[in-house]
Image (cartoon, helix red, strand yellow):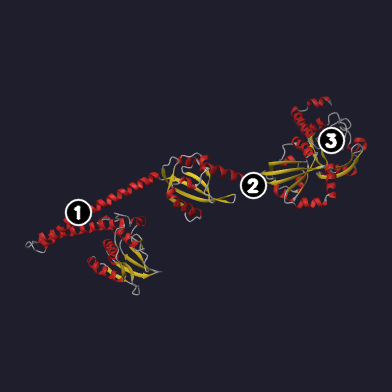
C-alpha cells in the first residue's frame, strides 16, 4: 500500500491538500462519505459542533458515530439514495436528540462526487485495502445547525405577535439580529423594500454582510456597548442593497435581551439636501465675498445692515464691524435721504429693482455714486433687501462731461447755423434776382447753372433749418402751437405738395382715410413736418409702385400709416432709423435728422412712432396721436 501512495502524482496531492484546506475552513460541519456511508474526511466544525474526536470519526460508518447517535433512519435512507439515483439533497431539515448536545435541528445539503481512483486512493489511504473500480463515488454532506435560530424564531413568533404586527407595518426599516452570532432573524416590509432582499435572503445573512459594521469583531464591540448603554446611534452609516448600491442611513441599535433591534432611517435625500445646501452656502459666500460689486444685506423693517462684503467696506472706507452698527440712512448724504428712502421702499415692495445713480457718502465725507440693484429675500421669517452697489462715479463724471460737450456742441451748431443763414439768404435772393432777369437777359447755359446753384442753396437752407429744429427740440425750448386740427386735412395738403414728385417718378399716391375721425389737438405745422419727412423718405427710395397714406381710429388714438413699395429695410437696421445723423441709404443725401426730428415731435405730442418692414417688399412708417391731450410738456 505504501508503494502505491508513493507512485501518486504529486500534483494530485497538492490539489487534494488544497481541497482539504478549503473544507477545513468551512464554518458549517462537513463530511465526506464513501458509498457505504463510511466517513473518510471531516472538518473541525463537525468535531466542535457535535463534540466528537477525529479518531472516533474517520474510518467509521456514519450510523456508528457517537455510540450510534447518528443512526438517524430518515438521514440514512436519504444518503443511501444519493449514489444510485444521483440525487442532490438541498436544505433538508431534520431534527434529532444527541446524547451530549441535546436536541438539534439541522439543515442538510448533500450530493454525489465521482473522483478518479488515484485521488480516492489518497483520500482513503490507510482505510481501503484494494482499488476495485476505475472511479470512486463519494458523498459530500454539509450540516448546518439551526437549532438556536429555530428556537429564537419560534420563541419570537409565540410571545410577540403584537410586536410583530407593529414591526412588519412600520414605515421605518427594521431588522432583528441575533445578539451572539449577528444573524439577521427577521426583517420588515420597509427593510425588504429599501435593501431589495426577500425575507428568506435576509435570514441567510449576517449583519455585517449588508454594512453597518465591518465584521464579527466589530459586531461584538457593538454588543458590548449595547449591554452598557442600551442604545447605540450611528449618524451617517452606509448600508449596501442587494444590487450593491450604497445608501446613507441613520441607525439606532436597541438592546432587546437576546436580540438586537436595528432601526434604519434612509437619509439619502436628507444627505443630498444637506450637501446641496452646504454647496449653495459655499457658492453664495464665494460669490458674495468675491463679488466685484459692493454687497449689503439690510433688514426691511429698520433698514439696518446685517451682512456686508469686503468690496463695500473698501468702497465706503468702513470696517465690517462699523457697517454692522449702521443703517441705510447713515451711508447717504442727508439732503438726498428722502429720495434714497423712497427708492428703498419701492425696492422692498418690488415696484423697482434698480435704483440708478444714488449718491453714497463715504467715511471720509466724500461722495460717490452707485447703481443699486436689489433682490428681496426672507430669512427666519424676516424680509431683507440684498443690495448690489456698483460704483458709477466715473460714469457719472463722464455723463456730466458729455452733457457739457453736447451743450457746447449745440450752442456752437446753433451759432454757426444762424451765422450761415444771413449770407445764405442774401445769396439766395441774389440768385433769384438774376434768374428773374432783373440784371439782364440770361443765356440758356447761364440759366442752367444758376438753377443748379439755386437748388443747392435751397437744399443748404433746408439742412440748416433741420439742424436748428433738432437743436431746439433737444433742448426743450421749442414752443408748440396746440389747437384742434383735422389730421385728414393735413394729410391731403401733404399729398398736394408731394404729388408732383410722385408723378415725376411714375408712382401712384393713394389716400385711404377714415372720414369719421374727430378733430384732435396738435401743432399743425409740426405734424405736417413729420408727414413731409416720412413721405419724402418713401418717395426717395421707391422706384415703382405706390405710396399709400392711411388713417384709422383706435382706443383713444388716431393711427397714421405711410406705406411704400420700395426696397424695404433689413430687420437689424430698423433700430437705427430714428438715431441722430443716421442714414441707411447715403445716396439720398440729407442730414440724417429727419426721422430723429419726427420722433421728438411725436413724443412731445404724447404719441409713438415706429417702422415695420420686410426687406425687398417695402416699408410702413406709422405713428399714433392721442385723441385726448396728453402731450409732453416743454
Estimate the x, y position of residue 344 in percent, counting from the top left: 48, 52
Give the mark toward the camera: 1 or 2.
1
Query: Residue visible at 51% across and 55% down?
Result: 349
Task: Label 2, secondary structure: give it.
Answer: helix
Q: Using the image, tell me which numbered label, if any, was put on residue 437.
A: none
Estimate the x, y position of residue 284 in percent, counting from the top left: 54, 44
Q: Closer to the camera, 349 or 213?
A: 349
Q: Which residue is mark 1?
A: 419
Question: Dot 1: few (<14), some (14–19), or many (≥20) neighbours within 10 Å?
Answer: few
Q: Using the image, tell me which numbered label, if any, was put on residue 46.
A: 3
Query: How many numbered marks, from 0 up?
Result: 3
Estimate the x, y position of residue 202 in percent, counting from the top left: 75, 45
Which badge, 3 or 2, comes first in the chain's sequence?
Answer: 3
Which badge, 1 or 2, comes first in the chain's sequence?
Answer: 2
Question: Dot 3: few (<14), some (14–19), or many (≥20) neighbours within 10 Å?
Answer: many
Q: Using the image, tell me which numbered label, if any, was put on residue 270.
A: 2
Judge whether residue 16 can be spotted in this image: yes
Task: Label 3, secondary structure: give it.
Answer: helix
Amino acid at each position: 500500500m505504501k508503494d502505491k501512495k508513493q507512485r501518486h502524482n504529486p500534483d494530485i496531492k497538492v490539489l487534494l491538500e488544497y481541497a482539504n484546506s478549503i473544507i477545513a475552513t468551512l464554518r458549517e460541519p462537513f463530511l465526506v462519505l464513501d458509498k457505504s456511508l463510511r466517513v473518510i474526511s471531516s472538518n473541525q466544525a463537525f468535531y466542535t459542533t457535535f463534540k466528537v474526536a477525529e479518531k472516533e470519526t474517520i474510518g467509521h460508518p456514519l450510523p456508528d458515530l457517537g455510540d450510534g447517535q447518528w443512526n438517524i433512519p430518515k438521514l440514512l435512507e436519504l444518503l443511501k439514495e444519493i449514489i444510485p439515483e444521483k440525487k442532490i439533497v438541498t436544505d433538508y431539515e431534520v431534527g434529532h436528540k444527541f446524547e451530549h448536545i441535546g436536541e438539534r435541528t439541522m439543515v442538510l445539503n448533500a450530493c454525489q462526487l465521482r473522483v478518479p481512483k488515484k485521488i480516492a486512493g489518497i483520500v482513503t489511504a490507510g482505510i481501503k485495502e484494494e482499488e476495485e473500480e476505475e472511479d470512486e463515488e463519494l458523498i459530500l454532506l454539509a450540516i448546518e445547525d439551526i437549532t438556536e435560530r429555530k428556537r429564537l424564531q419560534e420563541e419570537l413568533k409565540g410571545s410577540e405577535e403584537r410586536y410583530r404586527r407593529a414591526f412588519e407595518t412600520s414605515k421605518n426599516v427594521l431588522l432583528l439580529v441575533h445578539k451572539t452570532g449577528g444573524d439577521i432573524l427577521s426583517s420588515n416590509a420597509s427593510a425588504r423594500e429599501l435593501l431589495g432582499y426577500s425575507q428568506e435572503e435576509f435570514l441567510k445573512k449576517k449583519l455585517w454582510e449588508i454594512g453597518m459594521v465591518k465584521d464579527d469583531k466589530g459586531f461584538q464591540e457593538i454588543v458590548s456597548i449595547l449591554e452598557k448603554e442600551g442604545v447605540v446611534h450611528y449618524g451617517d452609516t452606509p448600508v449596501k442593497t442587494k444590487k450593491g448600491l450604497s445608501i446613507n442611513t441613520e441607525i439606532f441599535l436597541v438592546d432587546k435581551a437576546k436580540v438586537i433591534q436595528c432601526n434604519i432611517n434612509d437619509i439619502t435625500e436628507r444627505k443630498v439636501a444637506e450637501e446641496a445646501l452646504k454647496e449653495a452656502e459655499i457658492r453664495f459666500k464665494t460669490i458674495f465675498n468675491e463679488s466685484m460689486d459692493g454687497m449689503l444685506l439690510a433688514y426691511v423693517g429698520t433698514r439696518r445692515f446685517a451682512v456686508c462684503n469686503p468690496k463695500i467696506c473698501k468702497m465706503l472706507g468702513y470696517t465690517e464691524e462699523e457697517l454692522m452698527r449702521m443703517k441705510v440712512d447713515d451711508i447717504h448724504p442727508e439732503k438726498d435721504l428722502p429720495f434714497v428712502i423712497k427708492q428703498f421702499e419701492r425696492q422692498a415692495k418690488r415696484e423697482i429693482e434698480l435704483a440708478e445713480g444714488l449718491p453714497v457718502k463715504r467715511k471720509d465725507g466724500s461722495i460717490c455714486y452707485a447703481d443699486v440693484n436689489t433682490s428681496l429675500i426672507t430669512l427666519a421669517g424676516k424680509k431683507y433687501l440684498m443690495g448690489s452697489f456698483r460704483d458709477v462715479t466715473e460714469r457719472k463724471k463722464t455723463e456730466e462731461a458729455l452733457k457739457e460737450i453736447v451743450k457746447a456742441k449745440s450752442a456752437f451748431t446753433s451759432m454757426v447755423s444762424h451765422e450761415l443763414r444771413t449770407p445764405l439768404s442774401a445769396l439766395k435772393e441774389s440768385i433769384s434776382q438774376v434768374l428773374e432777369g432783373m440784371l439782364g437777359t440770361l443765356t440758356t447755359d447761364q440759366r442752367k447753372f444758376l438753377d443748379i446753384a439755386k437748388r443747392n442753396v435751397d437744399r443748404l437752407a433746408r439742412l440748416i433749418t433741420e439742424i436748428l429744429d433738432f437743436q431746439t427740440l433737444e433742448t426743450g425750448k421749442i414752443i408748440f402751437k396746440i389747437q384742434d386740427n383735422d389730421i385728414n386735412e393735413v394729410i391731403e395738403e401733404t399729398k398736394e405738395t408731394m404729388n408732383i414728385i410722385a408723378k415725376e417718378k411714375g408712382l401712384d399716391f393713394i389716400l385711404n382715410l377714415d372720414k369719421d375721425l374727430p378733430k384732435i389737438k396738435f401743432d399743425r405745422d409740426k405734424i405736417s413736418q413729420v408727414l413731409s419727412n416720412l413721405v419724402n423718405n418713401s418717395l426717395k427710395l421707391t422706384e415703382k409702385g405706390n405710396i399709400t397714406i392711411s388713417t384709422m381710429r383706435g382706443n383713444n388714438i388716431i393711427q397714421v400709416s405711410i406705406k411704400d413699395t420700395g426696397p424695404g429695410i433689413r430687420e437689424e437696421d430698423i433700430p437705427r432709423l430714428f438715431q441722430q445723423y443716421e442714414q441707411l441709404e447715403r445716396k439720398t443725401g440729407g442730414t440724417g435728422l429727419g426721422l430723429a426730428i419726427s420722433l421728438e415731435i411725436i413724443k412731445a405730442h404724447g404719441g409713438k412712432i415706429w417702422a415695420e418692414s420686410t426687406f425687398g417688399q417695402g416699408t410702413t412708417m406709422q405713428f399714433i396721436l392721442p385723441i385726448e391731450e396728453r402731450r409732453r410738456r416743454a
